[in-house]
Image (tube, rainbow, N blue to C red):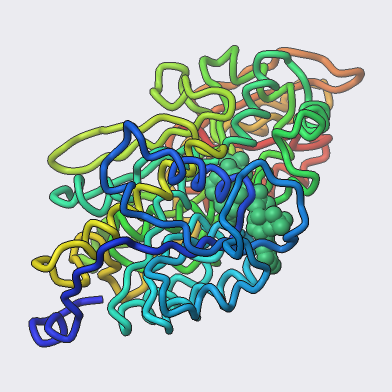
Amino acid sequence: MCQNGNELNKFLQVKVVGIKIGLLGLGTVGGGTVEILQSPEGRHPLLQELEIYRVGVRDRTKNRSLQFAENVLTTDLEAIVTDPNIDIVVEVMGGLEPARSLILQAIANNKHVVTANKAVIARYGEEIFSAANEKGVYVMLEAAVAGGIPVIQTLKQSLGANRIQTVTGIVNGTTNYILTRMQTEGADFAQVLADAQQLGYAEADPSADVDGLDAADKIAILASLAFGGRINLADIYCEGIRQVSAADIAYADKLGFVIKLLAIAHRHTTKTTDSDLLSIRVHPTFVPKIHPLATINGVYNAILIEGEPLGQVMFYGRGAGAGPTASAVVSDIMNIAAILKTETVPIPHPLLSCSHQHYCKIAPIQELITRFYARFLTKDRPGVIGKLGTCFGNHHVSLESVVQTGIHGELAEIVVVTHDVAEGNFQLAIDEISKMESIDRIASKLRVL
Ligand code: NAP
Ligand code: HSE
């Protein structure tokens, strides 16, 4: 939203004493949020002015450890988002619907919104922020990306002076946990996933995490803030970790890498036009062991931001869980409460609200320039390495290393690492190689950071 002076004048200057919160959801994040709000001692004094007014759940009869005054708990979520007494609606119920509709209804009823729902924001951000801008209310989403890591406000405020070039993140704890265990135990993906599900680290339906979709939602939000434009989720190249094998993890180790699921957003300036073009992608990546992101293990998240003039800055912490995520939710509530309490700051505050309307241009993945690792199983006969090298060369793919290490039954295993090449050229070479009579199969191909 770009407000001019006249538009700013239409927004209310209000003084509110005792800010009433309507919570939608009382699960992991909602429960953590209530725990902070119900124990304000030793925290910021502003917390003492916040009141949990209504809490919406699906099942009111569920056994819950948290205590509320009578009539606070309800299954009528619409009554919360339309209640004229409520100032801030906190959506921590998850899912696309009815979460999206309830957020829109809250906005239509002049409520500020705090949400942890990356799936809704990444898909319906345009609709939600347009409605919020129209009404002059805030939609805050610190908890939606990397849980407890304060990266959203950092991008909006503290890094605002920088021209951001690249955002690279490990933003999904489940996949980082699985890859870390594969690395330390030499185990295969399916085996670790089953164990992670049994331990409650991975969902019964793990697709959003292991197929990279959750990370894609998160990098869409981060890129939108870093590069000041909306991101069409469908433009993000997304590849999960299902195909990463114990053999690839072992080769990565030998070659001086670890494998991480990275979400990357990078700004190019095209030579021909001057306009910015972004590349945004999620995929398992060979990360050099000396890279700061290589050391992020288990369920932890980290985000490395590179900008001018700051250079590199990295944020590390817990990306999920009741306490960390609630820390982010409550900080958003406090930011809104602080504004509601003052008569001097106009709503909307330019550093807290959404200020862009255009969509960023995203380059097709074929235009990406990157290094690749590829593993081939081939007939064990003279000339195969030569044929591979010739084919790559014909497609302008320069090889940094070629190793033949093992024999699997009748087949030889050949691993190549390329120099920086155009993804489209690499793919053409791979397509041609896959048809060679001496090639049994291309076991894997992964990008190298
Ligand atoms: P959760 O534990 O499954 O809790 C969901 C809550 O919402 C429950 O209290 C449930 O009610 C209520 N609910 C769900 N659908 C409802 C409906 N249709 N009507 C009424 N109530 C409904 O979820 P969560 O893990 O807290 O996640 C909430 C949001 O935070 C999601 O968007 C998630 O992506 C995001 N998030 C979560 C984490 C995390 O660590 N869990 C981290 C970052 C972001 P009942 O209690 O009656 O079942
Ligand atoms: N499923 C997510 C993860 C939870 O594993 O990181 C936090 O968004």
Q: Along the horizontal axis of the image, is 97 left or right of 449? A: right
Q: Residue furthest right?
A: 409
Residue 236: where, in percent of width, then height?
51, 59
Answer with the quadrant where ligand 2 appears in the image. Answer: top right
Quarter of the image with the N terminus is bottom left
Q: Residue at x 58, y 35 (%)?
A: 173
Q: Residue furthest front?
A: 70
Q: Can you say whether 299 is above or below 111 in the image?
A: above
Q: Along the horizontal axis of the image, is 120 left or right of 369? A: right
Q: Along the horizontal axis of the image, is 344 left or right of 77? A: left
Residue 250: where, in percent of width, then height?
67, 17
Q: Can you say whether 18 is above or below 104 in the image?
A: above
Q: Can you say whether 290 is above or below 322 in the image?
A: above
Q: Nearer the viewer, residue 241 or 3?
A: 3
Residue 380: where, in percent of width, then height?
82, 21
Q: Nearer the viewer, residue 201 or 383?
A: 201
Q: Residue at x 66, y 41 (%)?
A: 65
Q: Nearer the viewer, residue 244 or 332?
A: 332
Q: Is residue 15 visible?
A: yes
Q: Can you say whether 303 is above or below 5 in the image?
A: above
Q: Residue at x 47, y 19 (%)?
A: 295
Residue 255: where, in percent of width, then height?
55, 16
Q: Residue at x 19, y 79 (%)?
A: 12
The number of numbered badges drawn on the structure is: 0
Q: Is residue 395 visible?
A: no
Quarter of the image with the C terminus is top left
Q: Nearer the viewer, residue 206 or 376?
A: 206
